[in-house]
């Protein structure tokens, strides 16, 4: 049983992750979060909110998970969001063609191949159907969005969103007003996204329904320095650098990464470092974290630069978990073109500037009687024409697919020097996009430990999830030494005090104390409080530390404050009470 199987076995048995629709046989690409998994997920999401909403000041919004077709046509998802698919001509099973080629030929670059090259590779190497061994058919593009309709009758085409980002882009004007139209500003969203994967594999690593945490930070196109870059200038990143032989991981200071041109600019670099901060805070092993720049053949057409935070796993190798991109102004311009609403912002200069300005002035008193209802649209088209077109005796404009001829006496144009106080711009966008489900799996794997221990002179193994205290689903266990009423009552009183303090408590009086310690080790509970008969004599209890298994004894009068401070990192375990020698 490899590490992945060990983690999934524990996760299912202890209530972290369960296969969806299990009583009906299940289906690939869907997982449920059990009681502990849901709590773990909420803690990780709350840490993300603390870093991006509280500390960075990027407010959170919530938009629908279903969107009208126009939104995804503008974003490019309708026309270009697809994977290469091929089907078995005998059993009808569908597969991702690039995955088949990668597995059969043991290469990692098939994702960048065209459909034709993939099809040739399958035929030339006689790659069979993985299910029945039959012949595979042609390769074609399969759009990954789940499609739907809105309303009865003449339904409006719609899709489940493949990312949370578009809901933030189309709210740009309202967001700009909320932030008093001052750049830079950011907005965040945590929510479900959907991708109709052809053949999901890797368990929870590739899901059809998944949670994203994304931030869209709108900045000036001309100034991509970050005002707080010094905060992270000395941060060391493990950067995966292509060197012609597959690449090497090179530790590099963030400041040097920008100066040497590895990272495009300070704003992107700052958010790469912030990503590292988040991942380490929730428990990712720093030795198993690297940042890899997208190669030219995988860089999105709208991106000026893009980096992935990759986390190493035992079975799947390096897993992409976070993408940090400079999306330029692509999205705002695309939605402007499709919607007809300009998603721009007015930027005021520090000092007004005198500039030469070409001005077109259509004469509406002449255009109106001649062109009636089309006059306004024609006037707008005239304003977009260059001088050489406007100098013609008869000016041609196209409105709604129809050609109109406008006599030159119906429009005036001139070049004049004017005082300009500002300009209208399309901001550029920095986007950190987190795959929460993949991150949660990596946290589980990196926390999973199997340790040899000595219990009463006998060697045994214990399984322990060494979560960071901040993310542990259960923060403290309360354990009466025996299931006796005189111990149960004070134990339940202490449990109630913990809950009032806001701590997540597990009360357990079933089985031997050793078994209960092991149960709590397996779910990552950092501290266990034991109530025994000495408690009834001198008002003291023991606290056991999950990682070291050391125990201290202290008064129960302020036990809730002590445990709270231990979890918060305000107090060291050895300073909280008297160490019990074993």
Image (cartoon, grey):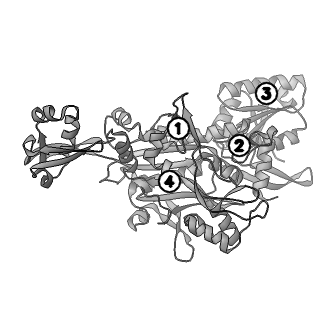
The image position of residue 133, as x and y in percent, is 78, 64
Q: Are marks 1 and 2 in contact (CB under 8 Å)?
A: no
The residue under the point 59% across, 52% down is 280
Separation of disc 3 and disc 4 at Cα? 68 Å
Which numbered disc, 3 or 1, marks the residue that appears first in the sequence?
Answer: 1
SS under mark 4: helix
The quarter holding residue 382 reads top left
Q: Nearer the viewer, residue 52 or 296?
A: 296
Of the residues under marks 2 and 4, which one precedes in the sequence? 2
Mark 2 highlights which residue? 31
Task: Answer with mark 1 or mark 2, whichever residue precedes in sequence.
Answer: 2
Alpha-carbon span between mark 3 and mark 2: 46 Å
**Label located before the other in sequence (3 or 4):** 4
Q: Which residue is mark 1?
A: 158
Asked if the residue under mark 4 is in contact with the one under mark 2, i.e. CB atoms within 8 Å, the reply is: no
CA separation, marks 3 and 1?
Answer: 64 Å
Residue assigned mark 3? 539
């Amino acid at each position: 049983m490899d590490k992945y199987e060990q983690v999934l076995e524990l996760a299912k048995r202890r209530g972290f992750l369960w296969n969806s629709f299990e009583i009906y046989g299940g289906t690939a690409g869907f997982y449920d979060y059990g009681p502990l998994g849901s709590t773990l997920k909420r803690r990780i999401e709350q840490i993300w909110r603390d870093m991006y909403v509280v500390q960075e000041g990027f407010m959170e919004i919530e938009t629908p998970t279903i969107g009208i077709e126009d939104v995804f046509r503008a974003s490019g998802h309708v026309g270009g969001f697809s994977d290469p698919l091929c089907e078995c001509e005998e059993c009808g099973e569908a597969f991702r063609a690039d995955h088949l080629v990668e597995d059969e030929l043991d290469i990692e670059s098939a994702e960048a191949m065209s459909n034709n090259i993939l099809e040739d590779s399958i035929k030339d190497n006689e790659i069979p159907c993985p299910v029945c061994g039959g012949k595979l058919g042609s390769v074609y593009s399969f759009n990954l969005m789940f499609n739907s309709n809105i309303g009865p009758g003449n339904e409006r085409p719609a899709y489940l969103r493949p990312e949370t980002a578009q809901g933030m882009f189309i709210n740009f004007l309202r967001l700009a007003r909320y932030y008093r139209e001052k750049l830079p500003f950011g907005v965040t969203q945590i929510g479900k996204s959907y991708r109709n994967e052809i053949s999901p594999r890797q368990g929870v690593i590739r899901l059809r329904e998944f949670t994203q945490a994304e931030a869209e930070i709108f900045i000036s196109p001309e100034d991509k320095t970050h005002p707080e870059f010094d905060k992270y200038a000395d941060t060391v990143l493990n950067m995966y650098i292509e060197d012609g032989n597959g690449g090497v991981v090179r530790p590099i200071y963030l400041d040097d990464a920008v100066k040497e041109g590895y990272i495009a600019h300070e704003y992107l670099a700052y958010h790469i470092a912030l990503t590292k901060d988040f991942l380490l805070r929730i428990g990712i092993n720093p030795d198993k974290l690297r940042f890899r720049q997208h190669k030219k053949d995988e860089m999105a057409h709208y991106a000026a630069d893009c980096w992935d935070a990759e986390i190493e796993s035992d079975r799947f190798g390096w897993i992409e978990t976070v993408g940090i991109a400079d999306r330029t102004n692509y999205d705002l311009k695309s939605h402007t073109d499709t919607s007809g609403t300009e998603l721009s912002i007015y930027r005021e200069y520090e000092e007004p500037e005198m500039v030469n300005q070409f001005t077109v002035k259509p004469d509406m008193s002449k255009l109106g009687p001649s062109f009636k209802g089309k006059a306004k649209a024609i006037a707008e088209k005239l304003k977009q024409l260059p001088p050489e077109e406007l100098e013609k005796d008869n000016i041609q404009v196209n409105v709604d697919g129809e050609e109109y001829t406008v006599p030159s006496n119906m429009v005036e144009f001139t070049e004049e020097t004017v005082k300009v106080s500002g300009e209208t711009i399309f901001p550029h966008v920095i986007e950190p996009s987190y795959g929460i489900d993949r991150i949660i799996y990596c946290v589980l794997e990196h926390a999973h430990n199997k340790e040899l221990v000595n219990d009463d002179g006998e060697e045994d193994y214990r399984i322990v999830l060494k979560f960071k205290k901040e993310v542990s689903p259960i923060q403290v266990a309360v354990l009466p030494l025996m299931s006796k009423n005189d111990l149960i009552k004070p134990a339940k009183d202490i449990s109630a005090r913990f809950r009032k303090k806001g701590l997540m408590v597990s009360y357990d009086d079933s089985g031997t104390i050793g078994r209960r310690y092991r149960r709590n080790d397996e779910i990552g509970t950092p501290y266990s409080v034991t109530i025994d008969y000495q408690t009834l004599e001198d008002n003291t209890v023991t606290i056991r530390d999950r990682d070291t298994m050391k125990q201290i004894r202290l008064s129960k009068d302020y036990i809730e404050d002590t445990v709270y401070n231990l979890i918060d990192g305000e107090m060291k375990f050895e300073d909280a009470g008297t160490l019990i020698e074993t």
